[in-house]
Image (cartoon, coloured by chain):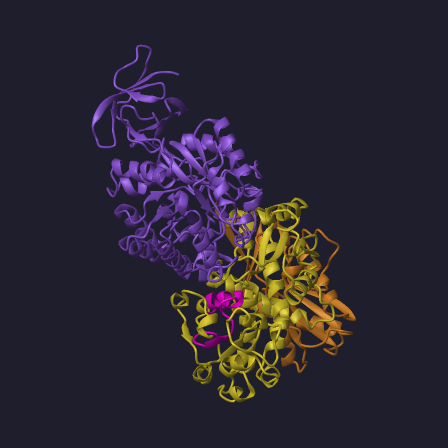
Amino acid sequence: MPSTKLSAVTLPDGTRTDLFIADGVFVDDAPSDAETLDCDGLIALPGLVDIHTHLREPGREDTETVLSGSQAAARGGFTAVCAMANTTPVTDTAERAEYIADLGRRAGLVDVTVIGAISKGLAGEQLAELGLMHTSAAHVTMFSDDGHCLMNPQLMRRALEWIKPFNGVLMQHSQDSFLAGPDACCHESEISGRLGLGGWPPVAESSIIARDVQLAEATGSRLHVCHISTAEGVDVVRWAKARGVRVTAEATPHHLLLSTRELEGYDTTFKVNPPLRTDEHIEAVRQALQDGTIDVVATDHAPHAAHDKDHAFVDARPGMIGLEQALSVVIQTMVNPGRLDWAAVADKMSHLPARIASLTNQGRPIAVGEPANVVLIDPARVAKVDRAASASLSRNNPYHGRLLPDPVEATFLRGAITYRK
Amino acid sequence: MEQTARSMLSADDMSRVMTRMTHELLERNHGSEGVVLLGILTRGAPLAKRLADIAARDGQSVPVGQLDITMYRDDLRANPTRSVGRTILPCDLDDRTVVLVDDVLFSGRTVQAALHALADLGRPRAIQLVTLIDRGHRELPIQADIVGKSIPTAGSERVRVHLTETDGEDLVSIERSA
Amino acid sequence: MLHLLSIADLSRDEIETILTTAEEMHDVQTRPVKKLPALRGRTVVNLFFEDSTRTRSSFELAAKWLSADAINVSAKGSSVSKGESMKDTLMTLDAMGVDAIVMRHAGSGAVRQAAGWVRASMINAGDGMHEHPTQALLDAHAIRRHLKAHDLGTMEGKRVAIVGDLLHSRVVRSNVLLLAKLGASAVLVAPPTLLPPGVEHWGVDVSYDLDTVLPDVDVVMMLRVQRERMSGGFFPSEREYIAGYGLTAQRLARLKPGACIAHPGPLNRGLEISSPAADAAQSIILDQVSSGVAVRMSVLYHLLAGDPGTQRRES
């Protein structure tokens, strides 16, 4: 295992120091054989943790594999990702969960944590084997039907109760499927009306969140709100937190940066679910991330093949990739305007997501004795995003052609370099 | 490039020529019975109207209309799309003598297009051609039945017909690029 | 013009040119030989991802009367379900070297997307709930003919009510844009459930009350209401819809003299429009149909007759 000295690196709290890595952990003195990296001007953040990643394996290995997704994650500064359950077949049994965890270990570039389905086949009718997935070698603690909203409130309640003994968490895709049906593909607004695209109203999100936080309160179980995108949804989470409900929420990079206006040209790259929102919602999400109502940033990295996007807007698959530009977008929208400092970025992209995912070896402070999961970033560098220059197998990158921060210099997983610019 | 213009017909000349052409037309057709005048847009239309007016002074009533041949041009594709003009037929053309009227007869392609257009509009008994100026350089086997004035020209020259109705004055001139 | 995708892309001059040429084309329909040679050698494909009898046959006749070769491709269900992407379908036709693709698709924006992929001229024959530009042009053409025939002047300052399922209508979006460009004003009449979101930003009047609107308008344009909308909760029953928004025989009497009745078809007789209204003397519904061919001839002519190189450079 190589030893490394990170000289004159800046920590999230602003202090400058030398860091020493040996045997995968931070140590207090330079090992004799240490390779020295000049980190003058670079900031060290704890390795980023993404609790919402679609890796597409098994089933759609043409669009992403656990390996290619891991590579993209490492390039984005991540040392852990959580693989969503909507693969083919769906991750709804212990065996399937272990299979994916095993693929993650073999790729070895990030820690791949498996998210299990809440309902069998994501059908929303019958509980998946939540407990067996938890006791399997994959140690599943997070469950989600993401891509589908678990509409049945009774099933939602039972699921929350079932996972309570092992402190699991349900990650809900909050979308009332009556208020926002299959044709809903554009934030309901003047733009959806003018473009003739099916409207996706904010109340379809906030009403489900309102129901779920009350179920979480009633059951005393943990709820996590995926990709919150509306001011109304944020308000409900704020209310629930004030009551002490065990609820956490995530914002995606794209909902922090991109607006409904991107849909004017019907470019299906910008089709995502929930849809891109208007400025007042973007501001509400940024504000909530700043004040802690939204706990974490999660990518909802959703690779798609071109042939699944080359349809009419309403027919195209929703989703966009995000692992490689997640930190770029957070710097652009939250750090540069002074809304988050680096310590807060470490919280929202590493410490807190690791806590939600019950990861004990990720999201740790940069301190002696802790695992050396760290990303070195140059906060000042900017570059034009080129979708072709990606480790992902897919090209549905909504930031293509945009000038964005290009911070990641190197990523270390337990002391080993997983990406270096 | 410098241009020189040479006047070929004055307003008075044109008036005399038009009167003579009308008489030739009536003589040729033994009066106005069954005759329809169709001016080819743009400047053929007012010329046809003038012929009809002169005939009317002699007590001969000739129906007069206009023909737009834009859609029938063989060079339609070589240019940006042109606006379409209005074809006005004063009566059914079947079994009539249709007299096409144009300002300048040059390559003959406009007349060819007009003949194609007429074929889609009816079946005249006969078609005749009247032109104010014949400047030669025919590319098709087409001749006018009645000519106002023949003007031998060089290919590089340009015959300009000005009419009061379209240009504010009556004048025919030749422009030469020097 | 290289494509016709949206009324929003047309200048007032371009609209005037299209409508003026359409008047000439209208005369062709009364000729013994309904054929002009302007598009000889050009190929027009009618690519319909969604069923349509009148629009497709209207475009087909328009192309044929201009001497273009016209073929119909029904691509219903061929795309998503068969694994072929919409882009593949378009690129395949384009590779055959066709000059224009007249396209209808249930997805809003689909024709604009297609225009980004192909070399051919794209003509929007209706995209989802977005636009149907030739319908709006033919509506304007038919209204202008009505005004001319009754010596009622131009479109400038005229008031047009558009009534019915405006939420799902591509006709209303194109018409609102076109009427504004022609100097007419629109008043949209629908129940709140069938109004598009953000309609208050469209620069038109909106009303829930057809009875108060009718006496003030020069044109009342009734839009089709699909009976299936009842199951979506958009209205409770046919009876209740008719009571509020149907052009009944009684409402007919509220129209001012000279006002005309339009409907893009197909008609739901007895629902949005009663038979007495559809067949009334002031109904221009059949004239809209004949106007459709004339307007589409004009559009095809202006898009395709000239040198494509020149038009591509100009656009």
B33 sits left or right of A420 in the view: right
* Residue C268: percent from left, percent from top: 61, 76
Residue in front for this viewpoint, B172 or C111: C111
In the rendered image, the quadrant that contains the C terminus of chain A is top left
Q: Nearer the viewer, residue A102 or C70?
A: A102
| Residue C311 in view (yes/no) | no
Query: Which image quarter is the N terminus of chain A in?
Result: top left
Q: Which chain is purple?
A: A
Residue at the top extreme?
A32
For this orientation, the residue located farthest to the front is A165
Q: Could you say which quadrant of the image residue B21 lies in?
A: bottom right
The residue lying at 55 percent from left, 60 percent from top is C128
Question: Is residue C178 found inside the magenta-colored segment of the image?
Answer: yes
Residue A338 lies in quadrant: top left
Q: Is residue C100 above or below residue A43?
A: below
Q: Which color is chain C depicted in?
A: yellow
The region drawn magenta spans C155-179
In the figure, the orange chain has which letter?
Answer: B
Expressed as whole percent of the image width and height from the top left, the position of residue B97 reads 75, 72
Residue C116 sits inside the magenta stretch: no
Work out which residue is located at the far left of the displayed protein and give it: A15
Q: Position of residue A413 (x, y in %)?
A: 39, 26
The number of numbered discs placed on residues in the rendered structure image is: 0
Q: Is residue A415 left or right of residue C231?
A: left
Q: Is A82 or A393 nearer to us in this picture?
A: A82
Q: Position of residue C117 (x, y in %)?
A: 56, 46
For residue A239, above or below residue B88:
above
**Does the image show residue C50?**
yes
Q: Is residue C213 left or right of residue C131?
A: left
